[in-house]
Image (tube, helix red, strand yellow):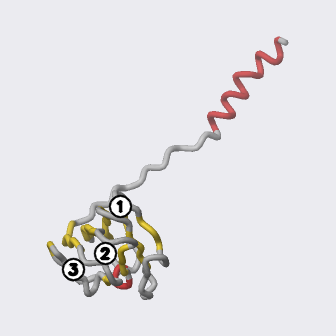
Amino acid sequence: MRKALLALPLLLWGVQAHAQTPVVVAPYFYQSKSYCQITSLSSATSLVTANCAAGSVPVLTTKTIAEICVEGSAVRYLDTGTAPTASVGMPVTAGICFQYSGPLNQMQFINQTSGATVDITFYQ
């Protein structure tokens, strides 16, 4: 028993010596570029050709990211250049906000049912 107690500090020291050090991630600061509110989504609407009820869509580059919020009713989107339909595409429930950093110039939205509004803030 005495040998086991003497070995305990060595075991604990070995665990501490191999513990992982925390990783520190540098913060990224994005600059707000523009805001767009899309209220007409009865047909597939591209961000490139969106008629914003408020704000405007910036020139979409590969460095642009967005915060997208859906309100009123659910929508669907595709970012492949293909138009979504009310039953095909990525569904987003009303009341959800999400960050997006894919090909914004190919993104299109459509209502699942009438009454959806999509609010988008663009960052770079």
Asked whether the beta carbons under mark 3 and mark 2 sit within 8 Å of each other, the answer is yes
Report which residue position mark 2 lands on: 64
Q: Considering the image in quadrants, where does the N terminus appear?
A: top right
Callout 2 amino acid: Thr
**Which one is in front in this view, the residue at disc 3 or the one at disc 2?**
3
Q: Residue 58, which numbered label?
A: 3
Instruction: Tell which circle, 3 or 1, labels the residue nearer the N-terminal end.
Output: 3
Q: Is residue 115 left or right of residue 91?
A: left
For mark 1, does the 10 Å Cα neighbourhood hold few (<14), some (14 to 19), or many (20 or more) residues? some
- In this rendering, the answer to whether 47 lies above or below 90 is below
Give the CA separation, mark 2 to mark 1: 24 Å
Query: Based on the displayed image, in which of its 4 quarters is residue 84 positioned?
Result: bottom left
Callout 3 amino acid: Pro
- Identify the residue at image location x=34%, y=56%: 27
Q: Nearer the viewer, residue 72 or 65?
A: 72
- Identify the residue at image location x=77%, y=16%: 5
Q: Is residue 17 left or right of residue 24?
A: right
* Most distant residue in the front direction: 114
- Identify the residue at image location x=21%, y=72%: 36
Report which residue position mark 1 lands on: 94
